Image (spheres, helix red, strand yellow):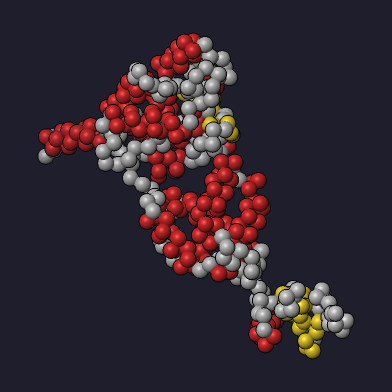
Amino acid sequence: MADSSSPKRSVFISTGVPGFEYRIRKDGSKVFYGWIPGRGRTKLNATAQRAARAEWDELRGKAGRGEQVIVPAKLKVEQVGDEWYADVHSNLRPAWAKDCKRALDKVIYKAWGSRRVSSITPQDIINLDRKLRASGLSESTVGNYLKPARGLFEYAVLKGYIAADPFKQIPRGKLSSCNTRREHREWTTKDVRRLIEKAYELDARDNARAEYGLAIEFKLRTGGRLGEVLGARYGDIDFEAGVWLISTQWTSDNELAPPKTHKSARRVPLAPELVKKIAARKLRVGAGDMDFLFASKKDGKPISHSNFRRRGWNLAVKGAGLDGGVKVTPHDARHAFASEMADLGLTSADVAEVLGHTSATITERIYLHAFNRDEREERVREAMIAATKGGR
C-alpha cells in the first residue's frame, strides 16, 4: 500500500531554498526547477540537487547582468527540425520546400536525428560536410543539403533551445558552398549547332521513345530553365508575335507549378524559324493549346527531367563530342545562350530580361563566359597587326 504521506508527482516541492523546487517523476527521480527573474519557473537540466543549485545560481547571475538566459533543451535534432519546417514551409517555394524536407530526412536526421540539438558541435558539422563530399557529391549539392540545417539551428537559437548557432562558429571557407561556381564549357557557334543536329538525329532512331531534338533546340535558343521548357504548352506560344509566355514550370516531381521567382514569369522572343518548327509539330501531332510541347505522346505529360537528361541531352552531348573535359549539363544551355547573345552584341540587361534574372549583375557574374574565343582572339590579333603597321 502506498504511503499516503508521499508527495504527489505533479506538486512542486520546496528544497528549503525559496525559488528552488523539484518534482518527482514516475520512476522516483527528481526534476529540479529554479525561479529566474524575467523568465519565471525554469526547468533545470542537472539531475543532482547540488548541481541543479549551481546551474540555477549561474542562470540567475546571467539574468541579473542582463544577459540572455538559455537553458539547453533536451529536444532531439529531428524534433526541432520538424518544428522549424512546420513553421517555415508555407513561406518557401513548393519545390524548395520539398528539397528541404528531403535533405532533413535523408541527410540531417540520418546523421544527427536522435541526438540532442544542444549536443551538435561545429566539428560535427564539418565532419558531415567532409563525409558528404567524400561520397562523391559536388560542393554545391552538399551546400544545399546543409541549408535546412542552418535554418534549423537558427530557429533553435531563436526559440531559446540553444545558446549559440554552431554554424556561426565555423570559420569561413570550412564548409561547402551552394554558391560555388563550377567550371563551364566555353561554347562556340559550331558547338551549339552540332549539339542541336545530334539531338535531331536521336529522334530518327528506331527505338526512340520521345522526340528530343526540338526540346534541346528550344532550350539552347531561348535559355529557358529545364522546368520552364518542359512545362511549355502550345497555348503559351504567341505564334503571330513570335513570343513564348512563361507562366508555369514542370518540376522534377512531375508536377506543374508556378515559376521559380516572380521575375521568372516573362516573355521570351522566338526566332521565326523556331516558331515555324513548333507550329509544324502542333499540326503534325494534332495538339491543342493546353497540350505540352514536349510530351512523349498526345495529351500526355511532359518528358520527365531525368528522361530528358538521360535519353536526350546526355546522348546528344556525347554524339556532338562535347562530353570530354568539363561536364555539360542541361543548365549549361542557359550559359551557352547568355554567352552567345552577349557575343552577338546584346547588353547584360537584355539577356537578364530573357533569362528571368532579377538583375544584370547575376547574368554578368554567373552566366557570361567566353564565346567563340578563337574568332575573337583572331579579330584582336588582326587589329594589333593593323595598329603595328600604322604605327610610327
Residue 210 seen in the figure: yes
Which residue is at a point 30% across and 41% down the rendered structure image? 326
Residue lying farthest to the right in this orientation: 4
Quarter-of-image position of residue 130: bottom left
Quarter-of-image position of residue 290: top right
Is 194 left, or right, of 84 in this rendering? left
Examine the rendered structure and indicate whether residue 279 appears above or below residue 322: above
Which residue is at a point 47% across and 22% down the rendered structure image? 296
Residue 228, given in percent of the width and then of the height, sits at 50, 31
Residue lying farthest to the front in this orientation: 1
Q: Quadrant of the N terminus?
A: bottom right
Residue 309, given in percent of the width and then of the height, sits at 40, 33
Residue 20, given in percent of the width and then of the height, sits at 76, 83
Is 156 left, or right, of 277 in this rendering? right
Residue 179 seen in the figure: no
Q: Nearer the viewer, residue 191 or 287?
A: 287
Which residue is at a point 74% across and 78% down the rendered structure image? 28
Which residue is at a point 41% across and 36% down the rendered structure image? 331
Is 129 left, or right, of 391 in this rendering? right
Residue 75, given in percent of the width and then of the height, sits at 64, 65
Examine the rendered structure and indicate whether residue 50 appears above or below residue 139: below
Examine the rendered structure and indicate whether residue 387 appears above or below residue 273: below
Q: Nearer the viewer, residue 345 or 47?
A: 47
Q: Nearer the viewer, residue 131 or 68?
A: 131
